[in-house]
Amino acid sequence: MAATRQSPDRSGPVFTALADATRRELMATLAARPGATATELAADLPITRQAVLKHLSSLQAAGLVASARDGRSVRYLLTPAPLSEAVAWMATVGSQWDERLAALGSYVRRGG
Amino acid sequence: MSDQVTRERFLPADRDDVWRALTERDGLESWLAEEAEIELEPGGELRFRLGDGQERAGFVEEVSAPERLSFWWRDPARRDEPLTRVELTLTDAEGGTVVRVAETREPATVEAVLLPATRVEHSTGPEMRASAGFALVS
């Protein structure tokens, strides 16, 4: 059988960054708007500018986002070099199954 | 090279009860989908509408009560992506059941076309179903 890539270390910063649906949405927004400020990003998302900054900080720590000062603003850019599409797929699908198995647990415990 | 996600969870419930949750409509609609249709035999069709509005369509590979259910599925709106394989395995454990899921994504090459057909061939499903399974992949 061909080699199989397994889910990477679940405590790693890239995995953690991607396992959150809001952060994935932020990354998608940033992909469409390279060089956006936190204020501009918050305008497109259902979260506050403060929350955007918190998420950007996680993404920067994971090496997925870079920032650059532009006068008094800070602009952000997606830097997907450490991100492979496979890792994103694994994080998304892993989160989906975590939710489903939790729901399954609740269902059988209810006597379903 | 294929990609795989696995998860395991212990459930304080009998394996037969967990198997029912995996294979009956009421069960599936409690934890996996808002709406679930599944023909529970090799080559049988399945169609789910998930909680987030996405859909999944595909076919069943193996039904081995009360131990293993496997199927292939994909979002029908994304025909550029290959089907992924889902395998759910139940194991008896002290005080309950361990459920293990493995979802595998094969590369979108010839293998993705041949592999499901090969698996369906090895099942005991009727030939008509095997053709339906193959057509879904192409």
Image (tube, rainbow, N blue to C red):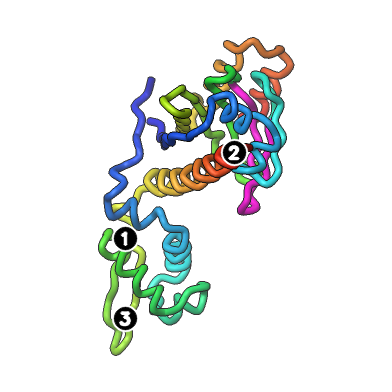
Q: In the picture provided, is A35 more to the left or to the right than B112?
A: left
What's the residue type where badge 1 is placed? Leu
Place residue B129 in its image quadrant: top right
| Percent of width and height locating residue A39 | 42, 82
Report the chain holding disc 1.
Answer: A
Q: Are marks 2 and 1 on the same chain?
A: no
Q: Are marks 1 and 3 on the same chain?
A: yes
Residue under label 2, please give it.
B74
Kindly indicate whether the residue at mark 1 contacts the one at mark 2 (C-beta within 8 angstroms). Answer: no
Identify the secondary structure beneath mark 1.
Answer: loop
What's the residue type where badge 3 is placed? Val
Identify the secondary structure beneath mark 3.
Answer: strand
Q: Label 2: how many residues lie within 10 Å, few (<14), some (14-19) or many (20+)?
A: many
Q: In the picture provided, is A58 more to the left or to the right than A24?
A: left
What's the residue type where badge 2 is placed? Arg
Nearer to us in this view, A14 or A51: A51
Q: Are marks 3 and 2 on the same chain?
A: no
Nearer to us in this view, A59 or B35: B35
